[in-house]
Image (cartoon, grey):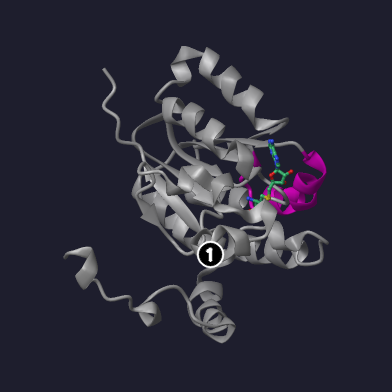
Amino acid sequence: MEDSKKVITASKGLLQSEELYQYILETSVYPHEPEPLRELRMLTATHPRAMMATAPDAGQLMAMLLKLVNAQKTIEVGVFTGYSLLLTALSIPENGKITAIDVNREAYEIGLPIIRKAGVEHKINFIESEAQPILDKLLKDHGNEGSFDFAFVDADKVNYWNYHEKLMKLLKVGGIVVYDNTLWGGTVAMPEESAPEDMRANLLNICLSPESQTYFTRFGTVPVQEVKA
Ligand SMILES: C[S@@+](CC[C@H](N)C(=O)[O-])C[C@H]1O[C@@H](n2cnc3c(N)ncnc32)[C@H](O)[C@@H]1O
């Protein structure tokens, strides 16, 4: 359809109200949330930075993607108390492995007892560090190139492009990388001057590049498509 003939149907778009979001959580998301994740969500709710945790609806979509690509070897950048990490650990098989990187181990330790109780700690290699040197280290081992099935990036937005370049080498063809916050609280569609300075779209250039093909309400996925020689 020509652009001029496209009709903007806002009512078909993203969720229109808090009430509707709540309705979806209560009728569809919470009833399917595994008990350990519910426990971790409740525990995290008391943390002063609780809003950083992955939303349970986004989490369920991520769990579906992990299962769709039958992910076994994954990377997570940005762990916090571990909601997305635990859901990844619960979604991958018994012999699956997650390289989980965060500059702050303290928050991870809040969720660790629940991860242990869920019996999935053995799948997790938590590394307390800035993410970039760890991704570089992984790339130095050529065996890691093209070997990861899935990556989830939920950390410092200014580095998303740097992470993307490295992850494209680490992920296998057909793998998926998921970036959280690609719609940046809706500011990506605001005139630049109306968005708060630290939330301007140029911080999220990766999300606006032609390489990002699919967008969801809170995160975007980039299917890995390059055919490697
Ligand atoms: C939004 S939170 C992650 C939320 C997490 N995915 C969850 O489900 O609860 C962002 C995390 O990224 C971490 N972080 C920020 N900058 C980082 C960096 N350069 N390298 C590694 N981790 C970083 C922060 O310490 C914080 O825990």
- Which sits in the foreground, 135 or 30? 135
Q: Position of residue 142 (x, y in %)?
A: 46, 13
Residue 66 seen: no
Residue 186, image quadrant: bottom right
Residue 52, image quadrant: bottom right
Query: Quick one: SS at disc 1?
Result: loop
- Which sits in the foreground, 186 or 73? 186
Q: Position of residue 187 (x, y in %)?
A: 56, 62
Residue 223, image quadrant: top left
Callout 1, which amino acid?
Answer: Met
Q: Is residue 120 magenta?
A: yes
The part of the chain drawn in magenta is 104-121
**Quadrant where the C terminus is found in the figure:** top left
Query: What main secondary structure does the magenta stretch of the protein show?
Result: helix
Question: Crowding near pointer 1: few (<14 within 10 Å), some, many (20+)?
Answer: few
Decide: is 210 above or below 53.
above
Q: Is residue 195 left or right of residue 161?
A: right
Q: Position of residue 139 (x, y in %)?
A: 52, 18
Decide: is 82 above or below 186.
above
- Label 1 belongs to which residue? 190
Decide: is 77 above or below 13.
above
Q: Residue furthest left?
A: 1
Decide: is 211 above or below 197.
above
Total labels drawn = 1
